[in-house]
Image (cartoon, rainbow, N blue to C red):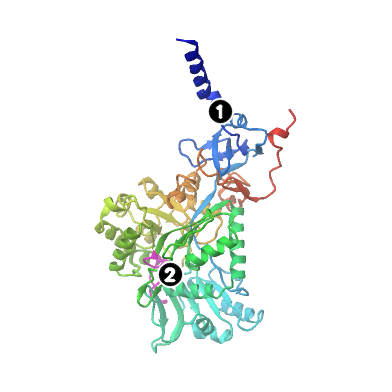
Amino acid sequence: MNSGLLKTCAIFFLAFSPVAVKSQQPAPDVILLNGKIFTSDAAHPYVQALAIRGERITATGDSAKIRTLAGPHTKEIDLGGRTVIPGINDAHNHLTIFPSGRIDLELNNPDPAWPEMKAAIAAAVLKGPKGTFIRGDIAWKIFRDPAVNRSALDEIAPNNPVILETLTNHAWILNSAALARAGIRESQPDPAGGRYERSPDGRLTGVIREYAVFNVERTFSDQTSEADALAKLHRTLSAAAKWGITTIQDMSNDLPPERCVALLEKLPTPIRVRVMRMPGTTPAGRDIQEGRPVPRSSNPLITVSGTKWMLDGVPLEGTFAPRDDPATVAYFVLHEQLTFPETEIAAMLQESRHDHDQLLVHVSAYPATAAMLNAMKSAGGTQVWAKQRVRFEHGDGLTPELIPLANELGIVVVQNPTHLAAVRMSPSFDNDLWEGTKAQPLRSLLAAGIPVALGSDGPTNPYLNIMLASLHPDRPSEAITREQAVIAYTLTSAYAEFAEKDKGSLEPGKLADLAVLSQDIFSVDASDLPKTESVLTMVGGKIVYDGKVIPPTPRAGDRKR
């Protein structure tokens, strides 16, 4: 072999040797060291350290290995043994806005009786000027009392719009002033999938349900000024970052997609927001045109995709049942009626295929769950739907005999852990009857191979929800581990939006969305989990919340050797 060829080979070898490649790789911008980093990657669940360049993770491993990657300008963050998790992806959230000046009633009882509520409303009337909104939360005692209606509220607050919202927000009781502010006339026809309740003489009682509630929410949202909307969204998203939430998937019931995107761009949002179309209905049917064409944003943190429809109500309230119906929650989970006829479910599936758009359906009870699965089976079955990731929001009625078909059809279940503690609170709760329904599966779904993601759909605190998922107060036999709950809240939530290749786990090549936590959520007592906060939240390698808890560390080039 001649010397020229030898020289060429030597150069080739040096250029492509591991040492040379390493020297050519840019140093990370940031390295996190000495932590307990839960990656949500089953193959390597825990590492000590990771490196970030730009918006992505470039390496993970032990602290000694990651430290060798640092360059003179690399920022080091010494975690001091703190726990780190992928950024929480809240897969089921509702970004809400409302006109300013509303008085929210402070009640002593989560299930207040009418005398307490009556006194609270009367006191609120004295606090604000005429016309001020008054809102209160109710549960079974008031919702199951037909005497609490529009007229009863008018007697206390004739000049203030009053709204009493049920626990699930699927039914409201309004007084006359609130009906007027919502533009609801006595002759108002029911919207598809909703109801304005009436007395025998045809007069509105003030009770509204399902899509009727949705339409009123949208009306009040439209009455909210841009300044008030921006202020409310800023508070919501800032609080999310403090929790370590780096993505919110918004069911856009309050804000149509166009307005939501415009507001988020003006803030601008510090975290990722996926906006999903959630159109309302009219007496003529579903509004399939809202959000078409799909709005686009120049901000990479904002995306719009997916369409959600509500196929039933909620068994907790028996949404469409008479208010004095004595039936139990166990009965309603097996018999709750559908909001739309099965022909409309078939149309939803057809629209999803035509638009290449992910379909999300609210299904809480058995009838709607079975109807949806049967419709998918008839509309092409596994061959068509296995990879479409149709989402069942809640999925409480996904009973054992339906689970195999759901698995075949590629269903993704998005559960909300606060719901897993609500049924046991009902006065009609009967443990034996509830166990007999086999409702609210969680562990069984994972065991069957069905992806389970988590979202709040209520209190935003993700660590409260992790606690409830790992305890499952309604059915303890269906509880999952904390690690499983975190994976559901991160990697599977990303899977539920077709984003698992970019986020959801702390692996090289993925976006550096993460949260450094105030305590180790994998070892603290369950009762302490809700006290958890993030002390440092990063989105795409950028710090979006800093609790000023971690001492600053000099850059590698500034340290004394």
Q: Residue at x 67, y 79 (%)?
A: 127
Q: In the image, 544: left or right of 313?
A: right
Q: Which residues are magenta?
A: 309-329
Quadrant of the image for the C terminus? top right
Mark 1 = which residue? 22
What residue is at 35 percent from the left and 77 percent from the top? 284
The image shows residue 314 at horizontal and vertical percentages of: 41, 66
Q: Is residue 74 magenta?
A: no
Instruction: Report whether 396 appears left or right of 23.
Output: left
Q: Nearer the viewer, residue 473 or 255?
A: 255
Residue at screen point 50% across, 38% down = 45
The answer to whether 204 appears left or right of 367 in the picture is right
Residue marked by disc 2? 317
184 vs 403, nearest the viewer: 184
Q: What x and y, as percent, mark residue 292?
A: 41, 65
Given the image, on which type of amino acid does mark 1 rest?
Answer: Lys
> What is the three-letter code of the residue carrying label 2?
Glu
Queried whether the magenta region covers residue 317, the answer comes back as: yes
Give the mark count: 2
Q: Is residue 2 above or below residue 421?
A: above
Mark whose residue sits in front, 1 or 2: 1
Query: Is residue 394 in view?
Result: no
